Amino acid sequence: MCSTMKVVGLMSGTSADGIDAALVEIEDRDSGLKAETLAFGNYHYPERVREKIFELFSPKTSSADRICRFNFVLGRLFADAAVSVIEQAGLELGDVDLVAMHGQTVCHLPWAGEGEFQVPSTLQIGEPAVVAERTGITVISNFRSRDIAAGGQGAPLVPYADYILFRHEDKTRVVQNIGGIANMTVLPRGARPQDVIAFDNGPGNMVIDAVVSEVTGGCMDYDVDGAIAARGRVVEEFVAELMDHPFVRIEPPKSTGREEFGAEYVKSVMARARALGIGDEDIVASVTAFTAECIGKHLSDLVVPEYGLDELIIGGGGAYNPTLMRMIRERVDPVPVVTHEAYGISSDAKEAIAFAILGYLGIHGIPANLPSATGAHHQVLLGAITPGRRSEKVWDRL
């Protein structure tokens, strides 16, 4: 395997607030892969673009031609983000070996439905050919589809990177990402790849953000520093109702998205809260507690009895919400709770770094899905390759 590559990881999550871009130098050592972040940037979507992306999520406002055009619109924005993070590191485009891009999920349907054509499927947009053409760099993308083709859910995929970054010989660790959706990776002490367990455990910031937008009349799109939730009171009976959601109750492997916790779900949450006479700040506090309780329940029911727990490591945007972090700490006490920053990794950058690692593995022909996490029948290579103008730069080094 090539000893060292510079890889740009690009990620836009279910919150659809922008593109995370990380330039990572990845080295294959005798002790395993080592990843050093050379630069990171978050490139927010213009508000009009974000509005159009959200229209793509709903069958009522989406259409084939809109998805087709925005596939290329987002391709341009992903290319711009790659160029920007490379320039931030003081490097030239020709210094970078690979771009690994997740794209923007517009629909994720991992479960088979009833009917002839109701097969498991997923769709991420952001045309890789545009990125390859505009940067000249080879692109690897479309990571989720192969896992679904192999009988998996196409998610979560980050656990292999969690394994590389956080595995410990003597400690059981859980790496909890809190993005739009919350997902956890369980790393038993001394774990081998096949021992890793991972799954989506419910909404992360998605419901909180949407509720904040509702109660502020669109003036805010997230709870800055958890301040609204901190002023509110958690209505335990309401949280218990939220915890009765079918997704929370089913056993892993499982994955979810806006299809279950998006706009229609938030409408039902708000309607129920209003019917119960719950005030605005108390609604925000309660849905924040819902996210914390989803995490705590999965830990106490599924992880601790089987593996114990020595440390909970939290990343994603939720790590910057002090009220949510306090609720999680109270729920899992006395287990130590830290953020990715304790290990020198930006909580914001983590998923972009993870896809850089997945891209590195894919370009080297190394399977990187974990059937224990996704439910796939077997391990598979992830990603489709779009050659850049200097593709020989990659092939000559493999």
Image (cartoon, grey):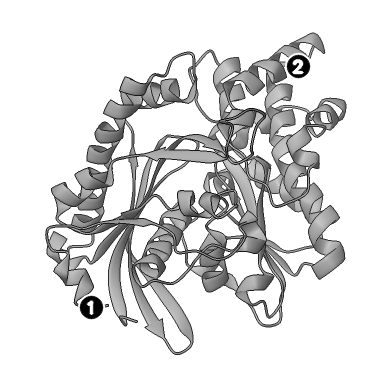
x and y percentages locating residue 379 in the rendered image: 55, 66
Q: In front: mark 1 or mark 2?
A: 1
120 or 72: nearer the eye?
120
- Residue type at numbered disc 1: Arg
**Image: 179 above or below 184:** above
214 or 15: nearer the eye?
15
User: Which label was assigned to residue 397?
Assistant: 1
Say which residue label 2 marks: 273
Residue lying furthest front: 116
Quarter the N terminus occupies? bottom left
Q: Quadrant of residue 180?
A: top right
User: In this image, 343 relative to 283: left or right?
Assistant: left
For mark 2, does the 10 Å Cα neighbourhood hold few (<14), some (14 to 19), or many (20 or more) residues? Answer: some
x and y percentages locating residue 116 in the rendered image: 59, 30
x and y percentages locating residue 252 in the rendered image: 73, 51
Quarter the C terminus occupies? bottom left
Residue 389 appears in the picture as rendered: yes
Measuring 52% from the left and 51% from the top, which residue is drawn there? 149
**Image: 337 above or below 46:** below
Residue 185 appears in the picture as rendered: no
Q: Quadrant of residue 76?
A: top left
x and y percentages locating residue 61 in the rendered image: 44, 15
Badge 2 marks a residue whose secondary structure is helix
- Residue type at numbered disc 2: Ala
User: In this image, 371 relative to 382: left or right?
Assistant: right
Measuring 81% from the left and 48% from the top, which residue is drawn there? 297
